[in-house]
Amino acid sequence: MRSINLDGEHICVDIFLRPDGTYGFDEFRRDPEDSSGWYSIGHFGDQVFEDVDAALTKAKNSVHWLSDHV
């Protein structure tokens, strides 16, 4: 649903909608020298939220840089 990148576009937080209608978020990283792509560094993806606003609020409280980029 939404991807918010930290400067440099190597770290991001994604807010996502699950097939069951719940929401979640996670923090990801990618290393330019590694072709495997994005991988989770936050490990928040199992948390479940009823709406996108709740997921974003929790993400801002959990990922130290996010509030400055939203």
Image: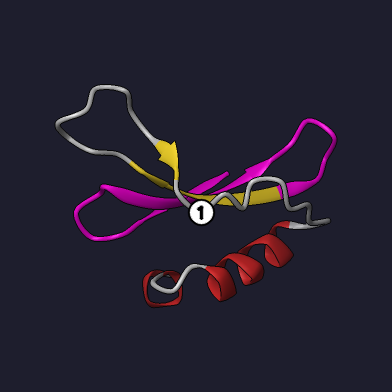
The mark tally for this picture is: 1
Residue 57, position in %: x, y?
A: 64, 71
Above or below — where is 36 with respect to 67? Answer: above
Q: Residue at x 24, y 22 (%)?
A: 35
Above or below — where is 4 with respect to 61? Answer: above
Q: Residue at x 58, y 75 (%)?
A: 61
Residue on which disc 1 sits: 42
Q: Residues within 10 Å of mark 1 (few under 14, many from 20)?
A: some
| Residue at the limit of the structure toward the top, as seen here | 35
| Quarter of the rendering occupied by the C terminus | bottom left
Q: Residue at x 26, y 47 (%)?
A: 10
Q: Is residue 4 magenta?
A: yes
Residue 34, position in %: x, y?
A: 21, 28
Q: Is residue 2 left or right of residue 31?
A: right
Q: Is residue 43 left or right of residue 68?
A: right
Residue 41, position in %: x, y?
A: 45, 49
| Residue at the limit of the structure toward the left, as seen here | 33
Specify how the rendered protein is coloured: secondary structure
The residue lying toward the viewer, choosing from 18 and 44, is: 44
- Amino acid type, label 1: Gly
Residue 58, position in %: x, y?
A: 65, 69
- Magenta residues? 1-23
Q: Is residue 32 magenta?
A: no
| Quarter of the rendering occupied by the N terminus | top right
Q: Is residue 56 left or right of residue 37?
A: right
Above or below — where is 25 with respect to 59? Answer: above
Q: Residue at x 78, y 57 (%)?
A: 51
* Secondary element type, mark 1: loop
Q: Quadrant of residue 4?
A: bottom left
Q: Is residue 11 left or right of residue 33?
A: right
